[in-house]
Structures are given as C-alpha cells and as structure tokens.
Image (cartoon, helix red, strand yellow):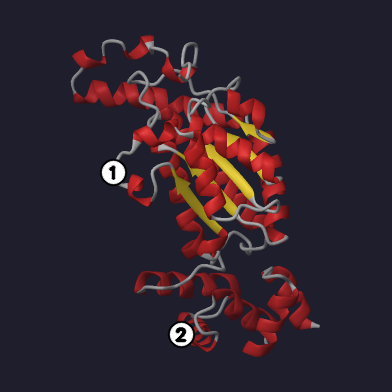
C-alpha cells in the first residue's frame, strides 16, 4: 500500500479549515490566496526545469519522442500538454503524446484504480516501443503513485531520459528519475484535492518544459509560433497577422504569400524576409532544421 503520511500534498491547510462557512466570495478569495503561492514554488525549480529543457531538446532533435505518463489529474494534464504541441508547433502526434493509466477513456472517465498498477505502466510503455532516445515525463502530485513510479523505473531500465514532475520534494519518484522537478505548493485549499495547486504547478512546469524545448529547437521565431498549423479560419487570420508583424508586409501581401507557401507560416516568413521563392525557402528551412532565423540567413546568401 502506498504510504501518504507526511506528504505535503495530503496535509490539512489551516488557512482554509473554515472554508465551508464562507460565502461564495470568501471561498474564491481563500482559493486565490493559496493559488498565489504556486508561481513562487515553481520559481524555485527553474534550474531543474532548464536542465530538463536542454536534455529533452537534445533527445528530441536526435529523433526521440516525448512521452508523458501519469494517472488521474496528473495524467490528464500531461496528455493535454502533448496534444497542444501539434497545432501549436507542428510536432507530429507520434512524436509527443500522453499515456494515461486506464487508457484513453481515462481522459474523460475516472479510472483511479489503474494508478495502483505498476505492471500496467510497463505494458503501456512496451506497447509504444519505448526506446533509449525517448524522454519519459512522469507526473504524480504525491510522487508515490505506483503507475507513475513504474514508468520512471521502466524508462531507466530501457535507457530513456526520465523526468519526474511531482509536488513533494522527497518522494520516491524524485529519487528515481534522472531529473526531478518538484514545486512544493503546500497543503491544498481542500485537503488532498491535488487537481488544485498541485495541478496548477504541474501545468506551469509542463508549459515551461514543452515551450522551452520548442524554442530551443527553433520552432519559435522572435516570440512567434511560426510552425503553427492554420487549420481553421481563426488560425489563418492569426497566421496572416503574424507574418505581417514579422515582415512588415501588409495583410493582403501576407495572405498571398501564405497561400503560395501552402499555408506554412515559416516558409512564408522566409520567402518575405529573404525575398526568395517557395522552393528556396523550403530548402533553407530543411538545411536549418526548421530554424527560421538561420533559414533566412541561408536564403539571403
């Protein structure tokens, strides 16, 4: 049986002990006061988050995958981060994805019993053929969830990079993983409800990890997501605005070049900035491994 005694995520918050006597404003004020502590806890983990960004980027650039593993709220947060990488940065779904204890249905229907199975985590990672070049990001607020622990253990056995994202610094997962990121947010406003502060902390950490990796890999130019996929009307408009802001082209010109570039924003930017055709822009981006700044320099030569 998992021992949760002494875990900060399971302790009682004295500041909110009488929350059940508050009116609605009082309730949300108390929750907000607790939420303010989350960013400070994450700030203390920045050196370890940065270390993880560099390690993940190196593996990903070499052909590895980013695989998020977890159960319950933690698993869902990981799956959400993975899902966003395709529309935002053009990352193929097979190269960044989440694995939830209990399967895909656990995203919408609670399957809490699955988190107790260490064997299930091994089965799930074997099913996706985990390899040494891959990265396993295992999430568990407590750091004691058997499924999440097993994901780290099997990842290390295979030789993959293992990263633990928890909210208890001295947890079992923290001791096992290659890199431990553990913002200690303290007791929840509602005791043990780790979808609250702990969940927010995990989301913030994953935002930094995935965004940091994408920036390091050149998926961002200036501070624009130039590898986004404009798959609906809103995103096409966003792409046009982005191209205009970067290159100084008016909206009509930006739209025309975007269409010439087959709606590939990075290609359109290189075409305009280097004053070149689509084929040359595509070739430059290939040589630059997708890095727009470098591609522009190549195309201008």
Q: Nearer the viewer, mark 2 or mark 1?
A: 1
- The residue at 44%/37% (across/down) is 74
> Alpha carbon of mark 2 to alpha carbon of mark 1: how far?
46 Å
Considering only vertical position in the picture, is 7 above or below 123?
A: above
Q: Position of residue 174 (x, y in %)?
A: 62, 27
As helix, strand or loop, the secondary structure at mark 1 comes to loop
At label 1, counting other C-alpha atoms closer than 10 Å, the crowd grade (few under 14, some 14-19, many 20 or more) is: few
Residue nearer the viewer, 58 or 288 = 58
Do the residues bearing badges 2 and 1 touch, measured as CB atoms within 8 Å?
no
* Residue 14: x %, y % from top left: 37, 9
- The dot on residue 109 is 1
Indicate whether 147 appears above or below 233.
above
What residue is rendered at 51% in x and 70% in y? Answer: 242
Residue identified by numbered label 2: 252
Q: Is residue 181 above or below residue 234?
A: above
Residue displayed at 32% across by 14% down: 16
């Amino acid at each position: 049986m998992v021992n949760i005694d002494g875990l900060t995520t399971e302790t009682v918050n004295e500041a909110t002990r009488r929350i059940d006597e508050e009116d609605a404003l009082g309730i949300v004020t108390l929750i907000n006061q607790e939420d303010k502590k989350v960013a400070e806890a994450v700030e203390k983990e920045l050196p370890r988050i940065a270390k993880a960004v560099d390690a993940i980027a190196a593996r990903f650039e070499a052909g590895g995958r980013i695989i998020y593993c977890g159960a319950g709220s933690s698993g869902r947060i990981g799956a959400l981060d993975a899902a966003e990488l395709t529309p935002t940065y053009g990352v193929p779904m097979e190269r960044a994805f989440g694995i939830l204890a209990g399967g895909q249905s656990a995203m919408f229907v609670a399957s809490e019993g699955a988190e107790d199975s260490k064997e299930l985590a091994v089965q799930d990672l074997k099913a996706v053929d985990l390899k040494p070049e891959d990265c396993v990001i295992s999430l568990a607020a407590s750091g004691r969830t058997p499924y999440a622990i097993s994901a780290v253990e099997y990842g290390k056995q295979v030789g993959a990079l293992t990263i633990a994202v928890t909210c208890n610094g001295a947890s079992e997962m923290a001791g096992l993983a290659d890199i431990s990121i553990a913002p200690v947010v303290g007791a929840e406003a509602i005791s043990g409800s780790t979808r609250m502060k702990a969940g927010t902390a995990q989301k913030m950490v994953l935002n930094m990890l995935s965004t940091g990796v994408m920036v390091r890999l050149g998926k961002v130019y200036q501070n624009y997501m130039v590898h986004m996929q404009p798959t609906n009307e809103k995103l096409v408009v966003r792409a046009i605005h982005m191209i205009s802001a970067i290159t100084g082209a008016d909206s009509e010109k930006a739209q025309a070049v975007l269409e010439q570039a087959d709606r590939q924003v990075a290609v359109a930017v290189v075409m305009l900035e280097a004053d070149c055709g689509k084929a040359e822009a595509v070739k430059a981006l290939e040589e630059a491994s997708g890095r727009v700044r470098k591609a522009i320099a190549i195309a201008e030569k």
